Amino acid sequence: MHRPGTPRLLVILPAWNEEEALPGVLDELHAAIPDADFLVVSDGSTDSTARVARRGSTMVLDLPVNLGVGGAMRAGFRFAAREGYDIAVQVDADGQHDPADVRRLVGALESEQADVVIGARFAGRGSYEVRGPRRWTMAVLSFALSRIAGTRLTDTTSGFRASNKRAIELFAAEYPAEYLGDTVESLVIACRAGLRVRQVGVEMRQRAGGTPSHSPLKAAVFLGRALLALLIALSRPMSKGAKEMSQ
Ligand SMILES: Nc1nc2c(ncn2[C@@H]2O[C@H](COP(=O)(O)OP(=O)(O)O)[C@@H](O)[C@H]2O)c(=O)[nH]1
Ligand SMILES: [Mg+2]
């Protein structure tokens, strides 16, 4: 529940077939951030994700078709913009993100005067590791986006992020839908609109249950596509909305 006089915070959880982990994750989040509101976006889950998500005051968007994380987040940002939230934080529904870090991300929006704060693995905390082609692709993406953002970014595909009102409004209007491309391209969109992107180091936990939605091979293939998406995003002229924001 929101406390008067503080920013209104919405936690958005994209959830696809997460009936196993979601109830525990929601209980933990509610306990850690009692002043936040929670929105679960399930799109075409074939299990009881949408039903188990209706815990306490949690709000649920139960979409009939699968849009992928990007499409689900776009719906979440539109909701946040329409309802006038000041801050939106994207958190995984599988328990991999530590609820205690949500406040650190939100705190960094202010202390770093950032519009978007990424919870980044590989930033000196935790022992999360990936290997092989996936690692190399992520390194290239980090290098390219660090240049674009004008700051060191080590984890451009992280789905753990806080956005302020400016970023919510931008992402409600344009948020890419491509798997893994969404994380990368959304950062390009933010930077090009003149938003300030920063990161804080986080530790990743094990999944609390269920299975990852994509195999490592698929993740590698899509990361390759993310690289392409980055090139395409860079080659695109800025949209009218983003142009206005950057002025
Ligand atoms: N709404 C929605 N959420 C998804 C979809 N695919 C994955 N997710 C969610 O996105 C988060 C991260 O996905 P996950 O499979 O754990 O990816 P990993 O952590 O990179 O292995 C989890 O909360 C998933 O439930 C999708 O198509 N739609
Ligand atoms: Mg996960």
Image: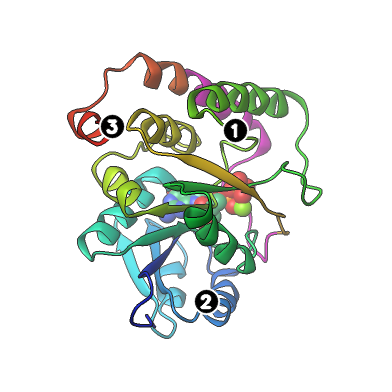
Percent from the top left, x then y, of residue 235?
36, 13
- Residue 1 falls in image quadrant: bottom left
Percent from the top left, x then y, of residue 109?
48, 54
Q: Which mark is residue 33?
A: 2
Residue 82 falls inside the magenta stretch? no
Residue beneath disc 1: 218
Question: For disc 1, does the CB lie below 8 Å from ligand 1?
Answer: no
Q: Amino acid at mark 3?
A: Ser
Looking at marks 1 and 2 on the same chain, the residue that comes earlier in the sequence is marked by: 2
Could you tell me which residue is drawn at 50 percent across and 60 percent down?
106
Residue beneath disc 3: 246
Between circles 1 and 2, the one closer to the viewer is 2
Whether residue 22 is visible: yes
State how the image is colored: rainbow
Where disc 1 sits, the SS reads: helix
Looking at the image, residue 144 sits to the left or right of residue 170; the answer is: right
Residues under numbered marks 1 and 3 in contact, where contact means CB atoms less than 8 Å apart: no
Q: CA distance from mark 1 to mark 3?
A: 35 Å
Span shown in magenta: 207-228
Q: Residues within 10 Å of mark 2 (few under 14, many from 20)?
A: some
